[in-house]
Amino acid sequence: MDKMNRAILAQLARDARMGWQELGRQVHLTGQAVATRVQQMRDAGVIRRFALVRGDVKRHFVTVFMDTPRFGEFEAFLEARAEVESASKIAGEGCYHVVLACEEDAVLEAFTQDLLSFGRYKVATEMRRVKG
């Protein structure tokens, strides 16, 4: 990733609703050039999804311990869940780290019930955001 793409990402992190023209002015490119670069970053997987971040959403950090090697099926399960903000295959303690963002505890309860078909889990809940 070059310096210009990092500048674009920094501006989007500050204000994701900024139009291409305004964003271009901030980073000294045309709006069309910015749109092209953003699309290239999406295609490369640098930008995966646009998400609305609300203050009343609770984040739960779920470590998943798989009982069987059904990784493809589990990853499809994660992709299909809108409440999954991010998920990573990890090395170390556990097999996956999942960030679940939801407003209601019932969503967490339903998610963890569905997880049982894949293995065990451990949940930690965000108390307050320190950065980002």
Image: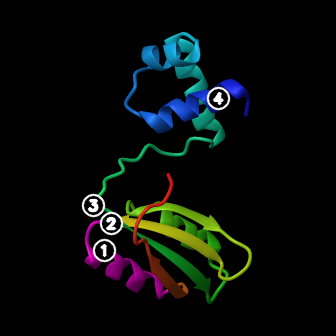
Q: Secondary structure at mark 3?
A: loop
Q: Earlier in the sequence, mark 1 or mark 2?
A: 2
Q: Position of residue 129 (x, y in %)?
A: 44, 61
Determine if the magenta segment contains residue 104.
yes
Of circles 1 and 2, the one toward us is 2
What type is the residue that disc 3 sits on?
Asp
Q: Position of residue 96 (x, y in %)?
A: 61, 74
Q: Secondary structure at mark 2?
A: strand
Q: Which residue is mark 4?
A: 5
- Furthest toward the front, the residue is 130
Q: Is residue 17 left or right of residue 87?
A: left
Of circles 3 and 1, the one toward us is 3
Q: Is residue 95 left or right of residue 121?
A: right
Q: Earlier in the sequence, mark 3 or mark 1?
A: 3
Q: Secondary structure at mark 4?
A: helix
Vertical side of 88 occupied by 31: above or below: above
Of circles 2 and 3, the one toward us is 3
Q: Which residue is mark 1?
A: 107
